[in-house]
């Protein structure tokens, strides 16, 4: 195989700019089919993006002989179902993040991939972004000495629409939680990539704004296998917006934003160095390229079902008590 021909299940907002074009821009990749339950919307997406075929039935796309691999871009409550169906059809699958609503669902997906002898990739795309590869290189080069600790702070005001009809991202039955699951999982997965696996976590989650059952205030203490310790605070009903991860080393600190393009800040005895690290135009393209390269036998992708399961287990550990208190039961 010289080209991976992709189909997408669920062409919603995330596929318009962040991910969909990546399957057309990546070397050795083609986007040949899309599916959405509302056929008119699938047809519209296909026409606007120059995709040859569209479907309103997922099984028809999965079993299209000209589709080699499938990207599942639906809300998380259907990730397990669709991923397993793709794998059982003998095709690799790339699943939007979070991988599923719970670690239990992730395990079932990984089991299906193992049984099929096929790869399962997850769209934690920051693992492959040049911005964070720069962070990783600085750590490897010892720019801040021996890494000792990590602090995470993510604050944002409540969305004014959150109190109306709840979007699926704030419905635990669909997404697995709230903004912490949607956004916090990105940060935790990135730290798994940069620092290493988290071996122990304690956390507390609350719903302070009274909007639905999803968490909007989360605190956690992390211990990494490497011995590095960390703390995290996520508040989605705050009076200001802040997005900062600080890596504390024996000879300095390295601070960066996870969700915007602010320069990295390296602070040592030599002073403060500001390092530009912009996002690519299509944020998922570096990761999609790594997936395509692996499927074509010319590389390895850094984001798999195995790594995403580690992140799901950390999220579950933090939210267990909150989910139980609000009667949230996930598969």
Image (spheres, helix red, strand yellow):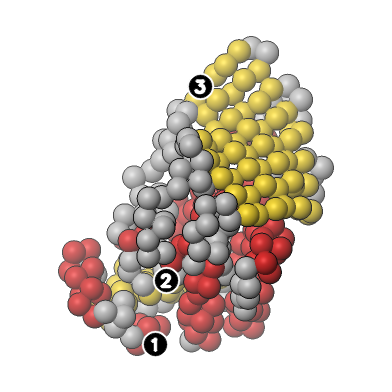
Residue at the top extreme of this rendering = 270
Whether residue 293 is visible to the viewer of this picture, yes or no, is: no
Tell me the SS state at disc 3. strand
Q: Residue at x 36, y 72 (%)?
A: 10
Residue 72, picture quadrant: bottom left
> Which one is earlier in the sequence, the residue at label 1 or at label 3?
1
> Which one is earlier in the sequence, the residue at label 3 or at label 2?
2
Residue 62, compared with residue 47, is above or below; it is below
Q: Is residue 115 left or right of residue 133?
A: right
**Residue 276's x, y, as percent?**
45, 28
- Which residue does the numbered mark 1 point to in the structure image? 59
Whether residue 119 is visible to the viewer of this picture, yes or no, is: yes
Q: Callout 3: 10 Å neighbours few (<14), some, many (20+)?
A: few
Q: Is residue 200 left or right of residue 44?
A: right
Residue 247, compared with residue 159, is above or below; it is above
- Which residue does the numbered mark 2 point to in the structure image? 74
Circles 1 and 3: CB distance less than 8 Å? no
Q: Residue at x 64, y 46 (%)?
A: 191
Tell me the SS state at disc 1. helix
> In the picture, which quadrant includes the C terminus?
bottom right
- Which residue does the numbered mark 3 point to in the structure image? 274
**Residue 231's x, y, as percent?**
70, 41
Q: Is residue 310 left or right of residue 5?
A: right
Q: Callout 2: 10 Å neighbours few (<14), some, many (20+)?
A: many
Residue 33, picture quadrant: bottom left
Residue at the front extreme of this rendering = 210
For marks 2 and 1, give the CA distance: 14 Å
Viewer-nearest of discs 3 and 2: 2
């Amino acid at each position: 195989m010289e080209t991976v021909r992709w189909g997408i299940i669920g062409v919603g907002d995330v596929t318009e700019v962040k991910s969909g074009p990546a399957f057309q821009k990546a070397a050795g990749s083609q986007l040949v089919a899309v599916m959405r339950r509302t056929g008119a919307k699938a047809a519209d997406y296909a026409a606007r993006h120059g995709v040859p075929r569209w479907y309103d039935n997922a099984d028809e796309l999965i079993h299209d002989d000209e589709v080699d691999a499938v990207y599942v871009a639906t809300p998380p409550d259907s990730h397990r179902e669709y991923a397993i169906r793709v794998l059982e059809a003998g095709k690799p699958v790339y699943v939007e993040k979070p991988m599923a609503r719970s670690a239990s669902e992730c395990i079932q997906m990984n089991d299906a991939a193992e049984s099929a002898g096929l790869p399962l990739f997850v769209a934690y795309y920051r693992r492959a972004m040049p911005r964070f590869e720069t962070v990783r290189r600085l750590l490897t080069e010892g720019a801040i000495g021996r890494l000792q600790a990590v602090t995470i702070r993510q604050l944002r005001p409540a969305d004014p629409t959150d109190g109306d009809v709840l979007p699926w991202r704030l419905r635990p039955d669909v997404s697995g939680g709230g903004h912490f699951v949607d956004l916090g999982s990105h940060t935790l997965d990135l730290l798994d990539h940069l620092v290493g696996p988290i071996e122990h976590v304690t956390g507390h989650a609350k719903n302070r704004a009274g909007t639905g059952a999803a968490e909007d205030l989360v605190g956690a203490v992390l211990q990494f296998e490497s011995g590095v310790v960390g703390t995290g605070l996520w508040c989605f009903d705050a009076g200001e917006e802040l997005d900062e991860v600080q890596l504390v080393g024996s000879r300095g600190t390295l601070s960066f934003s996870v969700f915007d393009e602010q320069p990295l800040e390296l602070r040592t005895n030599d002073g403060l160095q500001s390092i530009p690290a912009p996002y690519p135009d299509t944020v998922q393209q570096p990761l999609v390229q790594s997936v395509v390269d692996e499927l074509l036998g010319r590389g390895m992708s850094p984001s798999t079902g195995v790594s995403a399961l580690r992140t799901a287990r950390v999220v579950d550990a933090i939210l267990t008590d909150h989910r139980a208190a609000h009667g949230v039961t996930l598969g």
